[in-house]
Image: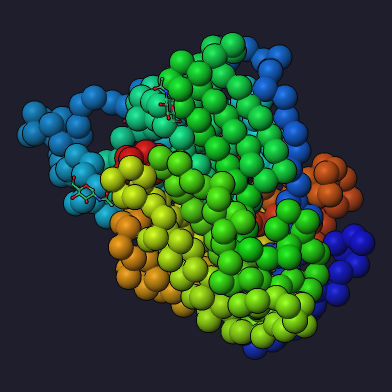
Amino acid sequence: MSLASSPVVAATMKAYRGKLHLPIITVVVCSFAIIALLYTERISSLSSSSIFKFSSCSRRRSAAKSKDKTADQNIYNTEIDDRFDFDPEECNVVNGKWVFNTSIKPLYSDRTCPYLDRQVSCVKNGRPDSDYRHWEWQPEDCTIPRFNPELALKKLRNKRLLFVGDSLQRGQWQSFVCMVESIIPEDKKSMKRGRAHSVFKAKEYNASIEFYWAPFLVESNSDVHIIGDPKKRILKVDSVAKHAKHWLGVDILVFNTYVWWMSGLRLKTLWGSFANGDEGYEALDTPVAYRIGLKTWANWIDSTVNPNHTRVFFTTMSPTHTRSIDWGNKDGLKCFNETKPVMKKKHWGTGSDKQMMSVVADVVGKMKVPVTFINVTQISEYRIDAHSSVYTETGGKLLTEEERADPLHHADCIHWCLPGVPDTWNQIFLAHL
Ligand SMILES: *[C@@H]1O[C@H](CO)[C@@H](O)[C@H](O)[C@H]1NC(C)=O
Ligand SMILES: *[C@@H]1O[C@H](CO)[C@@H](O)[C@H](O)[C@H]1NC(C)=O
Ligand SMILES: *[C@@H]1O[C@H](CO)[C@@H](O)[C@H](O)[C@H]1NC(C)=O
Ligand SMILES: *[C@@H]1O[C@H](CO)[C@@H](O)[C@H](O)[C@H]1NC(C)=O
Ligand SMILES: *[C@@H]1O[C@H](CO)[C@@H](O)[C@H](O)[C@H]1NC(C)=O
């Protein structure tokens, strides 16, 4: 089945032409988001060797000097920068702005890092513009240290770091791996890709940076073998053990789950014994199912994880940008052809559901084990320019010229180009580590 022939997509097109009530549009857009995801959830196996040399990777070190001191020393400077040094307790990194600066260079490219999936390798896939790689997130009250690969590896010495979640979490994992791998010699690193579990190792540091695929965190009939039709998916909202046994003994856990829940208003859920088979499901409203699923995950963490040994993080929902009217571009085709971030303060689109956010905050707020949020939602909301768009793949193949010419059907406005926005998520993550 091609995307174009999908009834959901046809409905999406109508939504762009005519007027539909907002909830309907939201459902349709969300369904489309899921459909789009399906065609891109492919785990390709990559070899650990690379034919590229790594010398072309620029290596930025975090500036030792704080902006504060510079400002103090130069009292005649008309633009006094009163932002304080980063302190995870003090600084709310969510308030701030994206600043364009061409001297900012990513630590890697999709040609130098051999571990990137084609899904996110926008330049390799033909993306012509490059401004999206030169924006830096600047919080109002502080500076976040630049991502320092050596510091990251030192923090991970003798440790396992595991990212758990969906393809957006996989992007964050690949971003992290690519930012550190360029300083590791060829024979001192390895990568093993698996269907569910992938492991990157930095041998000299005895460190591993891993990814585990669990798009709902809880179990479902659509985990490893993805079911295309969201209506046929059934979530076992009270079961997490099959996945969670792979999370044992890990030193740093980073979770996410959001977009897979957003396939429609209601989700088919099962709990208790499954002797009745799949017929015993109950359709629950999305936020209700999400709350139960997250509670199951939270109970596993609270009863299994020793906070003296393991740190737990949660990446908040990654915004989707499938309605250009959200940012006032009424002639736009989703995120296609966008080359600048939204500059309006506190911009928030329909792709990020505040009710779902409050469910996460509520469930995590009641946990015994402390969980640190990597709150990426607001900062990423501005970045309509940074998605894979038409410079991606579908069903394992690069988009054809024809598909590219039809962004309404084929632009991916869920996933992010790498290098790109997830590098900033990891910059924030490392600052909290
Ligand atoms: C741009 O980035 C460079 C390198 O980090 C920095 O020295 C410079 O101050 C930045 N410029 C602005 C306008 O922020
Ligand atoms: C290597 O790291 C693992 C955790 O990933 C740890 O259990 C082990 O003790 C470390 N080995 C050494 C020699 O420190
Ligand atoms: C964690 O460490 C503290 C202080 O050493 C100790 O009181 C507490 O019992 C430990 N918690 C667990 C779950 O081991
Ligand atoms: C994309 O943007 C460029 C420059 O802003 C414009 O010339 C072009 O017509 C746009 N393409 C489409 C299909 O909207
Ligand atoms: C993340 O930040 C947004 C504001 O940008 C806030 O509304 C939301 O509650 C935060 N999420 C969590 C889980 O703390």
Q: Quadrant of residue 262?
A: bottom right
Q: Is residue 163 left or right of residue 324?
A: left
Q: Please say if 191 is above or below 349.
A: above
Q: Is residue 90 left or right of residue 422?
A: left
Residue located 61% across and 77% down the image: 272
Residue located 72% across and 24% down the image: 47
Residue 69 drawn at (x, y percent) = 13, 31
Residue 380, can we see it?
Answer: no
Residue 168 drawn at (x, y percent) = 59, 51
Give the quarter of the figure containing the N terminus. bottom right
Residue 31, can we see it?
Answer: yes
Q: Nearer the viewer, residue 22 or 275?
A: 275
Residue 417 drawn at (x, y percent) = 62, 43
Q: Please say if 208 is above or below 249.
A: above
Q: Nearer the viewer, residue 197 or 309?
A: 309
Residue 370 drawn at (x, y percent) = 31, 57
Q: Is residue 387 left or right of residue 316?
A: right
